Amino acid sequence: MAILAPSILSADFAKLGEEIRKTDEAGADYIHIDVMDGLFVPSISFGMPVIKSVRKTTQKPFDVHLMINEPIRYIKEFKESGADILNVHVEACSDVEATLKAIRAEGMKPAITLKPATPVSEVEPYLSMVDMVLVMSVEPGFGGQKLIPETVEKVRQLRKIIDDQYPGVLIEIDGGINFVNVSDIVEAGADVIVAGSAVFGSNTEEMTKKFKSII
Ligand code: DX5
Ligand code: ZN
């Protein structure tokens, strides 16, 4: 069974705590939290004060996806806000190794993330330092986009590398995942499924349960 990480980017922010509680009670495993800086990606979402405030609504691990330049500047602040897993983009760090080590030193799980056009070879040197690798299946920046099919091949590639050399490292995939394509993605080797608009679109409880029953 795969892990479900609903992305709150698509939730109604006017009732964010309530929406998180609903997905938690319906079986969400992690809560996926997208932080955007308007530089690494064109959009701006939210930051530490929001994370800190929703930390009180659930015990589930916070899987924080940082779409920000040089995330090493804010690692302590994300720890203090309640992050458990910290995903950093390989494209956004001038010193990836130092960034991953700093995350581990703060007691969080480091994860490395790659954009659709970035080859797997760019993250391979860091697989021994992370707990998870996040394959972006859309251009990061916005919820509700269509999955880029070629990115599923990267999941297959990583599955093989990880099974051979780095057992225990999880493969997460994020962007455009829905009830139609999720089975193929799990079959390709993904361990953690992020879903935003497909979970928070209408009935959060029902959609969460439906995902859990498929994956
Ligand atoms: C995009 C974010 C995703 C997004 C997923 O930059 O990283 O987590 O919220 O949303 P959907 O599932 O709607 O593509
Ligand atoms: Zn994300």
Image: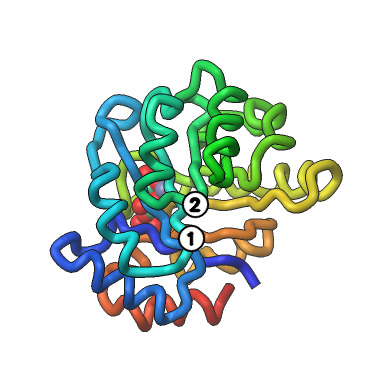
Examine the image and state in which quarter residue 118 appears.
top right
For the C terminus, the quadrant is: bottom right
At x 51% / y 49%, what residue is drawn? 85
Q: Residues within 10 Å of mark 2 (few under 14, many from 20)?
A: many
Give the residue type that dot 1 points to.
Pro
Examine the image and state in which quarter residue 66 appears.
top left
At x 50% / y 16%, what residue is drawn? 94
Q: Residues within 10 Å of mark 1 (few under 14, many from 20)?
A: some
Residue, disc 2: 84
Q: CA distance from mark 2 to mark 1?
A: 6 Å
For the N terminus, the quadrant is: bottom right
Q: Quick check: 183 left or right of 146?
A: right
* Local SS, label 1: loop
Sequence order check, earlier mark of 2 and 1: 1
| Residue at the outermost right position | 164
Dot 2 and dot 1 residues touching (CB under 8 Å): yes
Q: Is mark 2 within 8 Å of ligand 2?
A: no
Q: Position of residue 61 (x, y in %)?
A: 48, 60
Residue, disc 1: 61
Q: Position of residue 156 (x, y in %)?
A: 70, 49
Examine the image and state in which quarter residue 74 appears.
top left
Q: Is mark 1 within 8 Å of ligand 2?
A: no
Residue 119 visible, this angle: yes
Q: Which mark is residue 26?
A: none
At x 52% / y 64%, what residue is drawn? 181
Q: Position of residue 193 (x, y in %)?
A: 53, 60
Q: Is residue 186 above or below residue 92?
A: below
Give the residue type that dot 2 points to.
Asp
Residue 134 visible, this angle: no
